[in-house]
Amino acid sequence: MKNCLSLLLVCFCLNVNSQEPTFNSQDIAINNLIDGTLLTPNDVDKPRLAIIIAGSGPTDRNGNQNFMQNNSLKKLAESLTNKSIATFRYDKRVVKQIRKNDVDPNMTFDDFVTDAISIIDYFKNKDTYSSIYVIGHSQGSLVGMLASKDRADGFISLAGAGQSIDEVITEQISAMDPSLTDATKKAFESLKAGKTTTDYPPPLAPVFRADVQPFIMNWMQYNPQAIIKSLEIPTLIINGTKDLQVSIDEAQLLKNASESSTIKIIENMNHVLFIIEGDQLVNSKSYNESSRKISEELITLISSFILK
């Protein structure tokens, strides 16, 4: 018995010692607004770099918000770096401002694009990477498209919309309450004309409150189909069939606009990159379940696209 226990302990120690880190982690401040984490694989001298851009809201580098802790972007970054791809993920500027209790009321969508461009330029100037790819998740898809043009070597749209944000919101509201469709369209018509509005019913206040309207006005001027069509770099479009926020139809719109792009639809993958076998309730709850693993197929698709 003692010999058996000794053998088990030796095997355990050998196993622990063999599990050395496959990458180095370093926190980097790009500028006074943007902080992030760079993961560098140990097995490549001049790796390819993937810059990961988060979706809407005060989303941090790991893909989390105050009441949504899933670590989806952290898992994406670590999984790709384990495939010998360097990754950089960062907190959106609003995250840092919230932590300092100093949120800029005049923040625009263009500010997010400026941040992404600054990050691409930062790493291009380092001349440490053989190529730079941008992965934009959700809102970050449009941000990434705009920042990648004439800068990046490849672009990946992950759960990105194919319509302008006003069209996306109108569709979502119509699906929830068709009686609000006309009021929604009317409010957006005012914003398209460059005018703020107070002419909307109370249920639409979260969308059209006064402090949000300037940001929406800036965001809605961009048509993702036109932007992706203008990209002259390898482009991969990915979405999941269980995405509650961005349907696979949006991915198809992007593909239709970009003939040279590649589209991949992952069965049962949801908006935060998890594979969901259950119903909508299970899907919704998963947004706050950090113990889940992200899709293995997703990692294979992205790593193969970047490394080919």
Image (cartoon, grey):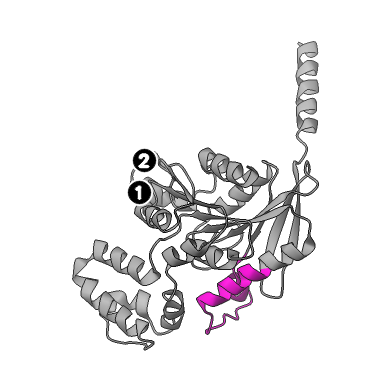
- In this picture, which residue range is highlighted in magenta? 91-118
- List x then y, in percent, for residue 164: 39, 69
Label 2: few (<14), some (14–19) or many (≥20) C-alpha neighbours in 10 Å? few
Q: Secondary structure at mark 1?
A: helix
Instruction: Please tell me which residue lies in front, 227 or 33.
Output: 227
| Residue under the point 79% across and 16% down | 7
Looking at the rendered image, the quarter that the N terminus falls into is top right
Name the residue beneath numbered marker 2: 278
Amino acid type assigned to the residue bearing label 2 in the image: Gly
- List x then y, in percent, for residue 292: 52, 43
Q: Quadrant of residue 303?
A: top right
| Residue under the point 23% across and 71% down | 181
Amino acid type assigned to the residue bearing label 1 in the image: Leu
Instruction: Please tell me which residue lies in front, 10 or 266.
Output: 266
| Residue under the point 49% across and 68% down | 57
- Inter-mark Cα distance, 1 to 2: 8 Å
Label 1: few (<14), some (14–19) or many (≥20) C-alpha neighbours in 10 Å? few
Q: What is the magenta segment's predominant secondary structure? A: helix
Up-down relation of residue 191 to residue 231 (above or below): below
Name the residue beneath numbered marker 1: 281
Instruction: Please tell me which residue lies in front, 236 or 298.
Output: 236
- List x then y, in percent, for residue 272: 48, 52
